[in-house]
Amino acid sequence: MQHRIVFVVGLSRTGTSILVKCLENSGYNIGKRAFGHKYKSQDGVFGYANNEIFSSLKDQLKGRVVDINKPIEVTEDIAKLVRSVFQYAQLYKVDVLKNPWFHNFIGIYAAVNAEFFDHKFIWTHRDPLERAKSEVRLKYMRSVPPGNSFKNYKVKKLMRWDYEYQDVHSLYFNKRNGINVYFEDLLNDTQSVSRKLSNFLGREFDSSTISKHETFKATGVPQ
């Protein structure tokens, strides 16, 4: 039987990193190659594979990050990348995988892996305007990289990612084994979210990282 994985699916600034940290505290193996700006949450192998897939598909994805109405050609090179992710997770018993752009490639992973939707999926959401504003705040904190333009840090431009994400969510959420988590509830109704995730996962969800002096409001990092 294939090793089962919890995929945390969501855009940046929607609570994905804190959820992965909570999953780690709940006994899930998030791998040793994980990294992140605050928590070690984004898997390096998973991120590399998705970056390579995007690079291979950039001509097909022009105009939109993802086009759910246009089939994407899954070449053998792309299939190998997808298989390598599952082989890596199987070999090292990695239980959780997260990458902010993974929603772009769910259809590709499903096309390669017949058991893909047997895994569990935590979909994160946040008010699009607030998420985009948070993204801008973080980018300005880090300063604009050389060669980049401040125009790439506009809220309206960043909000288009949310609409693309919702398109993908509406297409794939009901396939199987999915749960929605809302950023606002994660902050303001942590206990209810914790109970919901405990029932979904079939084990106790440890939300102490959120509730014990590590809430988003207490970190000092603008959210």
Image (tube, rainbow, N blue to C red):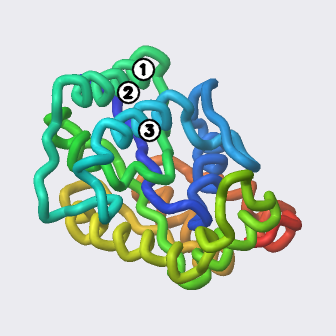
Residue at image position (82%, 64%) is 141
Quadrant where the image shows the C terminus: bottom right
Q: Is residue 114 visible?
A: yes
- Is residue 63 rendered to the left or right of residue 31? left
Q: Which mark is residue 85?
A: 2
The amino acid pointed to by label 1 is: Tyr
Is residue 209 rendered to the left or right of residue 106?
right
Horizontal side of residue 219 vs 82, given as left or right:
right
**Badges 2 and 1: C-beta atoms under 8 Å apart?**
yes
Q: Which residue lies at the image location 23% right of the left edge and 50% below the top edge? A: 60
Residue 137 falls in which quadrant of the image?
A: bottom right
- Nearest to the observer: residue 27 or residue 72: 72
Q: Label 2 vs label 3: CA separation? A: 12 Å
Residue occupied by mark 3: 51
Q: Nearer the viewer, mark 1 or mark 3?
A: 3
Taking the view exactly as shown, the residue that stands out farthest to the front is 147
- Which structural element holds mark 2? helix
Question: For the residue marked with disc 2, what is the amino acid?
Answer: Val
Q: Which residue is mark 1?
A: 88
Query: How far across and down, in percent of the image, does residue 4 sit?
Result: 35, 34
Give the secondary structure at mark 3: helix
Residue 186 visible in the current orientation: no
Give the CA distance from mark 2 to mark 1: 5 Å
Residue contact between numbered discs 2 and 3, judged by CB atoms under 8 Å: no
- Indicate whether 137 appears above or below 39: below
In the rendered image, residue 159, in percent from the top left (x then y), is placed at 49, 77
